[in-house]
Amino acid sequence: MKKLKKLLKWFGIFSLVCLTFYLGLYVYAKMLPKLPIDKANSFYLYDNDNKLYKGGNSKEWVALDDISPYLVQATLAIEDKNFYSHKGFDFLRIIKALHTNAVNRKRLEGASTISQQYAKNLFLDFDKTWKRKIDEAWLTIRLESHYSKDKILEGYLNTINYGGIFGIENASQYYFNKKARDLTLAEASILAGIPKDPTYYSPISNEKASKKRQKLILSLMKKQNYITNEQMNKAYQKKLNYHGDKNTNQLKTLMYYQDAVIKELKKINSIPSSFLKTGGLKIYTNLDMDTQEEMEKNISQYLDYNEELQIASVVMDPKNGKILALAGGRDYSESQFNRVTDAKRQVGSTMKPFLYYAALENGFTPSSTFKSEKTTFVLSKDEDYSPENYGKNYPNKQISMATALAYSDNIYAVKTHIFLGENTLVETAKRVGISNKLHAIPSLALGTEEINLLSMVEGYGTLASEGYKIKPYLIRKVTDSSGNVLYEHKTNKENVLNKSIVFVLNEMLSNSYAKEFIDYNYPTCINIAPKITKKYAIKTGTTNTDHLIFGYNKDVLMGIWAGYDDNHESDVKDGNSIKSIWVDTVEHYLKNKDGNQWYDIPKNVVGVIVNPVTGEVATDQDKKKKMLYYIKGTEPTSENKELDQLIPAAKIKPKENTE
């Protein structure tokens, strides 16, 4: 009993301290200037056809009196029944939600009030950080200290997301072709259910889920004495006709692009901070809606077997760095973490093209050979390193660089890496735009370092643009509400690689799906060869936890990562799935593009028909032949030197290996 009294005493003191602190913040907030909520977060985003695809608030701001009472009641019933009695935070609801989530060990309930949700809508992004939560709480207090409950509710209803349609007046017109003040109980209870998950609960894209949520809302309205039992049943049974278009911005991935845009916007120094706080901006982006839709369709189609597997994907125009489509995950409503902009993962063998560019720059050719066999590398201080080929497949013979790249041979890559010196790959990666810090270690050649996907896209963009480093970007222009230009993107190209060497490398990368390379192994992308109608440079990468693919020609570049957020092991099937996503998306993007998408042969480059595995000039006895390209003067002759003998014996010592 004494312990209980002591506990209650300390709880009372803690509650008093918290209340005093809150009142102090409230008084301080009252002394600050009012936030201009009628313009807050009025950011309008346009795609590459200058079509509006996201507006931060309603085009027609309607007064609370001009909104159907049914809609107001339905919103209060489902979102915040104590809205008119609390001061921004429903502390009893917070405690209840914490208890429920703790008991079930997962997040089943939320406790955000309408004031908190409105404060969240005043922000530019949805980062789940402590700073964000603190800023949101402070903004909630500022709203409550300066505005009446009616004004806050009015602002909330004019800015909330109703399935890609922002504001209740726009939503009412879109879904039911009528003004918000004319909504019936049945219509209002449908619309009030959408903001919980705007994609999932949209009656146009998912009427079954929408009706289920409507039933919950109507039951809460009855419980809270807004309507009678007869009204509840009649409204639920009412057959509704929807006016809107099924294809209008119902994408699960579009918000990832939007969040990336806002992140980029914050880094533009020429835009006054006042605009970033209060809005009133028109943001013209590079979004290609058709490509975004196609990419999302393919993600859904090829990953439908595994709901937990996550993805990050980017489509870019390598000529200028325009990001045309972006998915930071599979479904924004399920996870707002943007794996394109914010994650770093092991990139596996997708690191090898940068290694082989460095090798070509240092005298190697597509015909240069190493022996691919099970090998233990003895490094400094007698440390051992024993990489393995995928599937433990070793030819135990000399193979050409072109074959090593087509098969993604690990032994060849590590031998090349050590021969050049580990710092060479680090410096090459930095040159092409990979900004993540890399360590000069033997396994770097196999992509064991963690790198951000967007950084890798920039690196591959340098190869796709024939040696010019170009920064990927999403925003092409920003204006104020009157059309005055505040910012306009200017593409800067920096020539960092030799165009002729890049051409030789790109040609080798196009062998990843070439049937001429089928020998003791198969090229890594041979399984998607039947779908390929254009010519591409492609490289895949696989670790125990990650699958990647980058592929490009001069008109398009697409990079994809797939894996699990908790880093548990992935499956071979996942790697094959992203290959299908890649090929279907890029083929769709290029289907109506005219002209030659491949690169012109530089004047100092020659083609030679060779045996692809040995790299030697082809003879009549060779069953398989392939044209490979070389810088003039380095093309193969009848003699083919092995580079193994050039490597210092102290660096590589084959050892006895036991399985």
Image (cartoon, rainbow, N blue to C red):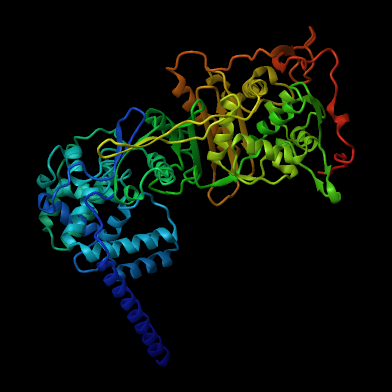
- The quadrant holding residue 256 is top left
Residue 70 as seen in the image, left or right of residue 411: left
Q: Position of residue 82 (x, y in %)?
A: 22, 66
Residue 175 as seen in the image, left or right of residue 440: left
- For this rendering, which residue is in front, 87 or 349? 87
Q: Residue furthest top?
A: 620
Q: Position of residue 278 (x, y in %)?
A: 29, 50
**Residue at 88 percent of width and 42 percent of height:** 656
Quadrant (top left, top right, bottom left, bottom right) of the N terminus: bottom left
Residue 234 as seen in the image, left or right of residue 576: left
Quadrant (top left, top right, bottom left, bottom right) of the C terminus: top right
**Residue at 43 percent of width and 67 percent of height:** 102
- The quadrant holding residue 613 is top right
602 relative to 250, above or below:
above
Q: Position of residue 148 (x, y in %)?
A: 17, 62
Visible residue check, residue 86 = yes
**Residue at 38 percent of width and 69 percent of height:** 99
417 relative to 122, above or below:
above
Q: Residue furthest bottom?
A: 2
Visible residue check, residue 218 = no
Q: Position of residue 330 (x, y in %)?
A: 44, 42
Residue 83 as seen in the image, left or right of residue 523: left
Number of disc labels: 0
